Amino acid sequence: MKILNWKKEIKSDELDEVSKCVANGGLIIFPTETVYGIGANATLKDSVDNIFKAKGRANDNPLIVHLADISQIEKYAIISNEIERKLIDTFMPGPFTIILNKKEIVPNNVSANLDTVGIRIPSNNVANAILKASNVPIAAPSANVSGRPSGTDISDIIDEFTGKVDYIIDGNEADIGLESTVVKVIDGVPTILRPGFITKEDILNAVGIVKVSDKLFKKVDGPVESPGMKYKHYAPGSECKLIYIKDINKRIAYFSDISNDKTVIIGSSVLKDIPCKKFLFYGDSLKDISHNIFKLLREADKYDPDMILIEGVSKEGLGLAIMNRLIRASSYNYIEF
Ligand code: TXA
Ligand code: MG
């Protein structure tokens, strides 16, 4: 296994090496603008199986296929209507995944036997260079062991995947920090199956209609539109509690009450003076929170707390995606008032 440093520039001899490796069936970890991905050539069934093994991922949870540009989509999937076309033209390349009817060429393990496939075109220059140079579609889930917070920081990724892949490419911390918005057009309505940086409001502006799946904040079992909804996700090892209290004074009072020298608090500057074992600052803007949150969920574990207390945010704009991840990270141990 090799770890490559492409933080400043993409080295062309190494790009050649990595691209050949992935085209020929190897596993690579690479940066995208959302989170790091663990990728394989999406047309090679056995290589795709190796992703599931390396992550310990359930094989009924489908993978997203990453492509270099929009013109390649119809090789792997069918664009069935004008709304799908408009979403693609508006949000791709970018932190957006569209679920389309799949073509034969996509192996069944990629789509977990569904007749649809998730397609994404990253806007990150490293991801894009690899997709172009390898000239193959790359199936890639987030680079984390299943159930754990998604990989956004290279040292966490190296800890989890050393020896399990052929290359790990360091391209700086993932910019956005939360995975792509996953959308499926159902009965003519773009439906958000996983919220992300492209918000409900963005989609509404682009196509005039949008729906948010009613399962985003519920524990789900059995058949769902997006199998990822039903699994344990993003969870640190320690127990977590997520708290959203609108009134700032009441929020400070509540955290002060339940915090002690064995709790870690993850939150904004509003909570910075509350006594606790360790305060981890996640930022004061939704963008900063989204960028920092997965890394901090992992860091919190290092203090071996009795409990991780997480400050919630309002579920508006990017806040919807942040709260969707945090509610799962805290295994639905959540209060709001
Ligand atoms: O930002 C991202 O999307 C990152 C980077 C690496 O591109 N990838 C990522 O992949 O988050 P993953 O596998 O961790 O999450 C994919 C999500 C899962 O919730 C899965 O259930 C859903 O997308 N999904 C994939 N294919 C689907 C399909 N055909 N129908 C419904 N949901 C699908
Ligand atoms: Mg994931």
Image (tube, rainbow, N blue to C red):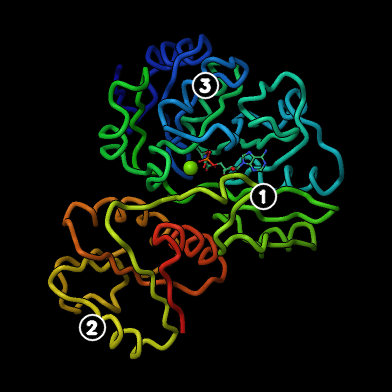
- As drawn, is 70 to the left or to the right of 4? right
Which element carries disc 3, helix, strand or loop?
helix
Provide the residue designation for mark 2: 256
Q: Which residue is drawn at the image coordinates 70% and 41% (left, top)? A: 99
Residue drawn at 39 percent across, 75 percent down: 243
Disc 3 from disc 2: Cα separation: 48 Å
Decide: marks 1, 3 in contact (CB < 8 A)? Answer: no
Locate residue 278, reporting x and y percent: 17, 65
Q: Taking 75 as reference, is 121 above or below it?
A: below
Q: Amino acid at mark 1?
A: Val
Q: Amino acid at mark 3?
A: Asp
Q: Nearer the viewer, mark 3 or mark 2?
A: 3
At mark 1, the secondary structure is: loop
What residue is rendered at 64% in x and 46% in y? 226
Which image quarter holds the N terminus? top left
Query: Which amino acid, mark 2?
Result: Ser
Q: CA distance from mark 1 to mark 2?
A: 39 Å
Q: In the image, residue 127 lies at what x, y percent?
A: 49, 30
Depicted 260 relative to depicted 38: above or below: below
Toward the viewer: 271 or 214?
Answer: 214
Q: Nearer the N terminus, badge 1 or badge 3?
A: 3
Residue farthest to the front, as pictured: 222
> Element under label 2?
helix
Specify whether tag 2 is near ligand 2 (CB below 8 Å): no
Q: Residue at x 51, y 35 (%)?
A: 58
Provide the residue designation for mark 1. Answer: 224
- Please name the residue that numbered disc 3 is placed on: 49
Tell me which numbered mark, 3 or 2, is placed earlier along the sequence. Answer: 3
Q: Is mark 3 within 8 Å of ligand 1?
A: no
Q: Distance of mark 1 from mark 3, alpha carbons?
A: 23 Å
Label 1 neighbour load within 10 Å: few <14, some 14-19, many 20+: few
Answer few, some or many: residues within 10 Å of disc 3's Cα (few below 14, many 20 plus, some between 14 and 19): some
